[in-house]
Image: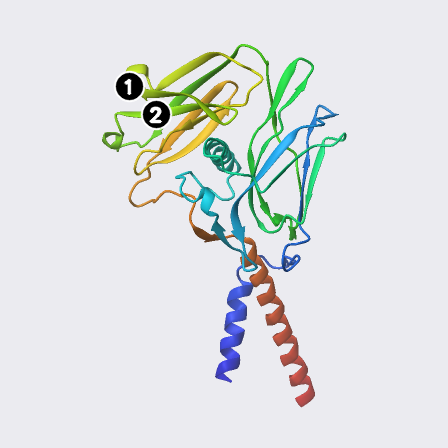
Amino acid sequence: MKKKLITVFICMILAALIPAGIIYAAGPGSGSGSSLTISYILEGEPMAGSNFKIYKIADVDEEGEYTVVDAFSSYNVVFAPGDQAGWQATALALYGYARRDGIEPVTDGDTNGFGVLKVDNIGRGIYLVAGGDSEFGGYVYESEPFIVSIPRRSGNNLQYDVTVNPKVRRDRPVDKEIKVIKVWKDDGREADRPGMIEVQLLGDGEVHETVRLDADNSWRYTWTGLDGTKEWLVVEKKAPEGYTVSVKREGTTVFITNTKESPEEPPETLPQTGQLWWPVFLLGGAGLVLLLTGFVGTLRRRKGNS
């Protein structure tokens, strides 16, 4: 009797993890049936022949535990699951480091005549997707790097066949200008800031120039007359000790933010291991089913004894 009560109690705890009536369906056991489809359309026009690189940031097992792959484990980036703006800043920072340090994508490919690139059997994981530069109507169009999780939660289900629509920005292919601005988020701890930091301008993955930012130049610098046919990225050479780094781009201005959290609020850095939320919902659904099954069984036994 005691064992039965403990089982029911565990089921009740699991069931309480999800809203009533919501059960998340499990996908393929190995994730071998997963796919990622990139639909690259601009104002109704398919962007054909655009190359996308896909990097795996983390592996995800059947329980939803994720482990950052070795290639990305040393970067002190901001990681805020569920925060799309935060993931965007993480994506741009990680892509810059991947290009600078020669990290190879797990796969890459060009969009077809419909502006579509589909990767089958991609498997579970957290992926960084970048690339997609195209020339059209006298302009160069660039896709913003982004992060996608497979499976991805969609409504009440887990989605193993994921379709994404990259955001696109337009730049003139000549006389390109890029400005970098350092932003500090360390209110009350300004004394911990280093006297200077170094940022690197990358042209097609190669270090074009390294510059120093400090109070004397107001923590900013501008490059002009750059070859607009190249892919230009800006990265912080190395994040200061105790700070995380994120990158945001607005037009031709790149903001590199260093954040220092208070001791009571440790930074949400990209951890070595962690857990996605979707297995919690799966377990909660299973707990609810077990609880209902046990309840129905009890009613039937009572009826049989009456």
The reply to whether residue 112 is in sight is yes
Name the image quarter holding residue 130.
top right
Name which residue lies at 64% across and 30% down. Answer: 51
Q: Which residue is mark 1?
A: 215
Residue 133: quadrant of the picture: top right
The amino acid beneath tag 2 is: Glu
Q: Is residue 156 left or right of residue 255?
A: right
Residue at 30%, 37% (x, y): give it.
241
Outermost residue, right direction?
Answer: 113
The residue to which callout 2 is attached is: 198
Disc 2 packing (10 Å; few <14; some 14–19; many ≥20): some
Point out the frontmost of discs 1 and 2. Answer: 2
Please identify the quarter of the rendering in which residue 118 is found: top right
- Whether residue 2 sits left or right of residue 156 in the image: it is left
Q: Indicate the position of residue 234 as horizontal and vertical percent values.
A: 45, 25
Task: Let me know if residue 306 appears in the view.
Answer: no
Q: Secondary structure at mark 1?
A: helix
Mark 1 packing: few (<14 Cα in 10 Å), some, or many (20+)?
few
Residue type at mark 1?
Ala
Residue 261 is situated, as x and y percent measured from the top left of the image, at 33, 39
Could you say whether the residue bearing mark 2 is in a helix, strand or loop?
A: strand
Mark on residue 45?
none
Residue 169 in the image: above or below residue 174: below
Q: Quadrant of the C terminus?
A: bottom right
Considering every residue shown, the one lying at the far bottom of the view is 305
* Residue shown at 58% from the left, 57% from the top: 19
Q: Position of residue 275 (x, y in %)?
A: 49, 54
Spatial separation of the CA atoms under disc 1 and disc 2: 13 Å
**Towards the viewer: 158 or 99:** 99
